[in-house]
Image (cartoon, grey):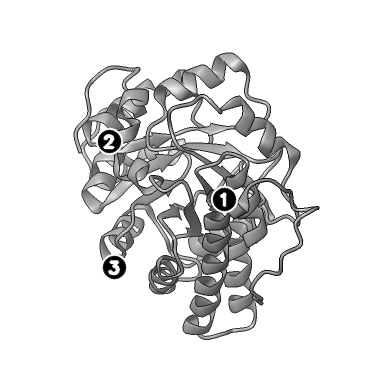
C-alpha cells in the first residue's frame, strides 16, 4: 500500500487501505485485547479465536503505564501484560508471530511511540515516531490508534504513517468540536473511531444516546465509522450498525473474560472458546444491523434473544 504525500491526504486515501477494505460490507467487528495479557502465547491463541468468531480487524493494545483513555477493566489488563514482561519489541515479535488474515491495529500512547527511537541500542538523535512506525509496519501492523495524540500535533506521526503505508485512526468523542472534527476527518485514514459515550472504556448494559448523536454528525463523512466504548453484546452491535455505523469496536467485554480466566486459573483454550463465542455473537449482531431486518430499534425496544455466553 502506498500513499501520496501531503497533510490532507487522509480522506482521499481512506478507501485504499487494508483497514478500509475490512469495512466494505458495513458490518465490521473490531476486537481489542491487550498484548501479553496474561502472556504473549495466550494473546496469540485469543487473537486466533477472535478471528475464527468473525473479527474483521484485530486491535492489539501495546501496554503503557498511564493509559488515560482506559477504564479499570483495560487498565488492569495492561498492568497484567506489563507484569508479564510485555515491551514494545516483544509486542512486535507477537505481531510477527500472529497467524491471522485480518489487519492488525496498534492501540497505544504517544510517548511510548515517541521514545522508541531513543531506546537503548538504537541510534536516534532526538525522539520521534518514525522508528516505531517503521518497525511496526515491518512487523505487520496496518494502523494506529493513539488516544492522547492531538490532531493539531499529529503531522509528524501522520507523515511517518504515510511513508510506511500505515493508517492513522483518530477518536471522535461526543465532546469533539466541529473544528477539530473537520481536522480529524481530513487526517484519519482506514476508519474513524467513534467514542460511543463520554468517559473511559468499559462494558455497559446499553448503547448511549451519544453514540447515535456522533453518528449523525458523521453521516456525510467518507471514511468508515466504527463505534466503541461500551459495546458488549450482539444487540448493541445491531443497534449501532442499524444507526449508521460501519462497524463496532469491542474490548472490555473480551478483557472481562480474560480476567475471569486469570482469576480462576482456567486453561487458555477454555477462555479462547468463550472469546470466539462472544465474537460470533457480536458479528451476528452487526450483520443483523446491516441487513434489512436490523433497521430501527434500540436496546430498550428490541428484545430478540441473544446466544448465551458466560
| Residue indicated by mark 1 | 292
Q: Name the residue under label 2.
A: 16
Q: Is residue 91 above or below residue 263?
A: above
Q: Which of marks 1 and 2 is nearer the N terminus?
A: 2
Q: Residue at x 21, y 48 (%)?
A: 138
Residue 160 % position (x, y): 28, 30
| Nearest to the observer: residue 306 or residue 82 | 306
Q: In this view, does 150 lie above or below 202?
A: above
Residue 46: image x %, image y %?
Answer: 45, 71
Q: Quadrant of the C terminus?
A: bottom right
Sooner in the amino-acid sequence: mark 3 or mark 1: 3
| Residue 82 visible, this orientation | yes
Of badges 1 and 2, nearer the viewer stands: 1
Relative to residue 164, is residue 141 depicted above or below? below
Between the residue at mark 1 and the residue at mark 2, the CA separation in whole angstroms equals 28 Å
From the image, which quarter does the N terminus lie in? Answer: top left
The tag earlier along the polypeptide, 3 or 2, is 2
| Neighbour tally class for label 3: few under 14, some 14-19, many 20 plus, Cα within 10 Å | few
112 left or right of 306 in image? left
* Mark number displayed over residue 85: none
- Out of 124 and 152, give the one closest to the viewer: 152
**Residue 242 coordinates in the image, percent (x, y):** 60, 46
Q: Quadrant of residue 110?
A: top left
User: Quick one: SS at disc 3?
Assistant: loop
Q: What residue is disc 3 on?
A: 99
Q: Which residue is drawn at 52% across and 83% down?
A: 270
For the residues marked 3 and 1, what is the alpha-carbon distance in whole angstroms?
34 Å
Q: Could you tell me which secondary element the residue under label 2 belongs to?
A: helix
Amino acid at each position: 500500500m502506498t500513499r501520496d504525500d501531503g497533510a490532507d491526504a487522509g480522506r482521499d486515501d481512506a478507501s485504499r487501505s487494508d483497514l478500509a477494505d475490512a469495512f466494505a460490507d458495513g458490518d465490521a467487528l473490531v476486537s481489542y485485547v491487550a498484548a501479553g495479557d496474561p502472556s504473549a502465547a495466550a494473546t496469540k491463541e485469543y487473537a486466533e479465536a477472535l478471528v475464527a468468531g468473525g473479527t474483521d480487524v484485530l486491535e492489539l493494545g501495546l501496554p503503557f503505564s498511564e493509559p488515560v483513555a482506559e477504564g479499570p477493566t483495560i487498565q488492569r489488563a495492561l498492568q497484567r501484560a506489563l507484569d508479564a514482561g510485555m515491551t514494545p519489541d516483544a509486542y512486535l515479535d507477537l505481531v510477527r508471530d500472529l497467524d491471522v488474515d485480518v489487519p492488525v491495529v496498534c492501540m497505544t500512547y504517544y510517548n511510548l511511540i515517541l521514545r522508541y527511537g531513543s531506546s537503548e541500542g538504537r541510534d536516534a538523535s532526538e525522539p520521534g515516531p518514525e522508528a516505531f512506525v517503521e518497525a511496526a509496519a515491518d512487523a505487520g501492523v496496518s494502523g494506529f490508534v493513539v488516544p492522547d495524540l492531538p490532531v493539531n500535533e499529529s503531522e509528524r506521526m501522520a507523515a511517518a504513517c504515510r511513508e510506511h503505508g500505515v493508517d492513522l485512526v483518530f477518536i471522535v468523542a461526543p465532546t469533539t468540536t466541529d473544528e477539530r472534527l473537520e481536522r480529524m476527518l481530513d487526517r484519519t485514514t482506514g476508519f474513524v473511531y467513534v467514542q460511543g459515550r463520554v468517559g473511559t472504556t468499559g462494558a455497559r448494559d446499553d448503547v448511549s444516546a451519544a453514540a447515535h448523536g456522533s453518528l449523525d454528525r458523521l453521516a456525510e463523512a467518507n471514511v468508515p465509522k466504527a463505534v466503541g466504548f461500551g459495546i458488549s453484546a450482539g444487540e448493541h452491535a445491531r443497534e449501532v450498525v442499524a444507526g449508521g455505523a460501519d462497524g463496532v469496536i469491542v474490548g472490555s467485554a473480551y478483557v472481562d473474560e480474560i480476567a475471569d480466566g486469570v482469576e480462576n486459573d482456567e486453561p487458555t483454550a477454555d477462555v479462547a472458546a468463550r472469546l470466539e463465542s462472544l465474537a460470533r455473537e457480536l458479528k451476528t449482531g452487526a450483520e443483523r444491523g446491516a441487513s434489512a431486518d436490523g433497521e430501527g430499534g434500540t436496546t430498550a425496544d428490541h428484545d430478540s434473544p441473544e446466544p448465551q455466553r458466560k
